Structures are given as structure tokens and as C-alpha cells.
Image (tube, grey):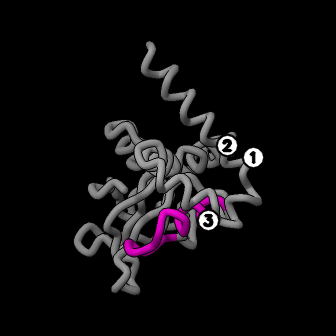
């Protein structure tokens, strides 16, 4: 997972979120209640921004992220397994999963894991691949996993060749 997660407070607007995402070259930003406690309350993704801007409503530009963010926020505890992360991401149709402290019920953000993070780990650790792929869940969804893996793998090859 990535530990230094870029966040924005829920009282900011979509322009501030877009700017912060652009400056940090990220595809999503975690929305927190306030800067001090870093309790995650939502997420705003590139897809959310396209959906919002596609409505062509000028008032949405100044609307608080509290209204626009995706919620409820789906999270995973830091002591969860890679398999748990894959199952959650697949079942909820997510590519990014905020990681919260397993001891805290307030969604205290400690990191974020993405589908690409998982594929990187699987590429580096073949034993982990075997343990994850032998699971019944993975067996049922093998074709989808293989397609996503191929997209990631070949996407990286094409990016690195440029």
C-alpha cells in the first residue's frame, strides 16, 4: 500500500480536488473530515469528476466535496490479507481501497492500496500468486483476473517503451 496518501478536506470543492490530483499525478483523492485527524469519509476519483463535470452545471464547481464524494467509503483494515483486498475490490467494482487502522472505528486513514499495487506484489512473489489463485473465489473469477492482469502488465510494458 501507499502510506503517504494525498487527502483533501470535505469542505473543499471539485476544483481544489482536481488541482491537487493533477499536481500529485494521482487518479483519486481521499476525502477526510479535517486535516488534523485524517479520518476518511469519502473518495473522489477521476471517474467521479468526469461524471460531475459532464452534467454541465456551473454550481457543481463550488459545491462541497461532502456532497459530491463517493460514499459510504469502503475501506479495508491494515491487518487484512491480499486475498481480502482482491475480494473487496472485485465485489465492489473498485480499483482503489483506503486502508484504515484495524484498531480504530473512525476510519483513521493509514494508506491506500490499488489494483496496480496488488499486481506488482503478485509479480514479485510467485508463491503469493499460487496461494491467492488457489482460492475458490479466484477460481470462479479467473478470466476477469487474467484480463485485468494482462491490461496492467501490457499497459506497463507499453508505457516503459516510450
Residue range in magenta is 75-90
SS at mark 1?
A: helix
- Separation of marks 2 and 3 at Cα, in angstroms: 15 Å
Specify the quadrant that holds the N terminus.
Answer: bottom left
Q: Is residue 71 above or below residue 20?
A: below
* Residue that appears at 49% across and 70% down: 75
- What is the number of the mark on residue 43? none
Q: Is residue 82 magenta?
A: yes
Q: Is residue 66 visible?
A: yes
Label for residue 146? 2
For image coordinates 39% across by 75% down, the residue present is 79
Percent x, y of residue 64? 47, 61
Residue 14 appears in view: no
User: Closer to the camera: disc 1 or disc 3?
Assistant: 1
Please state, as top left, top right, bottom left or bottom right, where the C terminus lies in the image.
top left
| Tally of marks | 3
Cβ–Cβ under 8 Å for marks 2 and 3? no
**Which one is in front, 156 or 4?**
156
Amino acid at each position: 500500500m501507499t502510506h503517504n496518501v494525498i487527502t483533501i478536506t470535505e469542505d473543499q470543492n471539485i476544483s481544489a480536488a482536481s488541482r491537487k490530483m493533477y499536481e500529485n499525478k494521482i487518479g483519486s483523492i481521499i476525502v477526510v473530515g479535517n486535516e488534523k485527524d485524517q479520518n476518511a469519509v469519502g473518495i473522489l476519483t477521476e471517474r467521479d469528476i468526469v461524471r460531475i463535470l459532464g452534467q454541465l452545471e456551473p454550481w457543481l464547481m463550488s459545491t462541497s466535496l461532502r456532497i459530491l464524494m463517493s460514499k459510504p467509503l469502503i475501506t479495508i483494515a491494515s491487518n487484512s490479507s491480499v486475498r481480502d483486498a482482491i475480494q473487496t475490490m472485485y465485489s465492489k467494482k473498485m480499483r482503489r481501497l483506503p486502508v484504515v487502522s484495524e484498531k480504530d472505528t473512525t476510519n483513521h486513514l493509514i494508506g491506500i492500496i490499488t489494483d496496480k499495487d496488488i499486481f506488482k506484489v503478485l509479480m514479485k512473489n510467485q508463491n503469493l500468486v499460487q496461494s491467492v489463485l488457489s482460492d475458490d473465489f479466484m477460481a470462479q473469477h479467473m478470466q476477469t483476473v487474467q484480463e485485468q492482469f494482462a491490461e496492467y502488465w501490457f499497459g506497463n510494458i507499453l508505457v516503459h517503451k516510450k
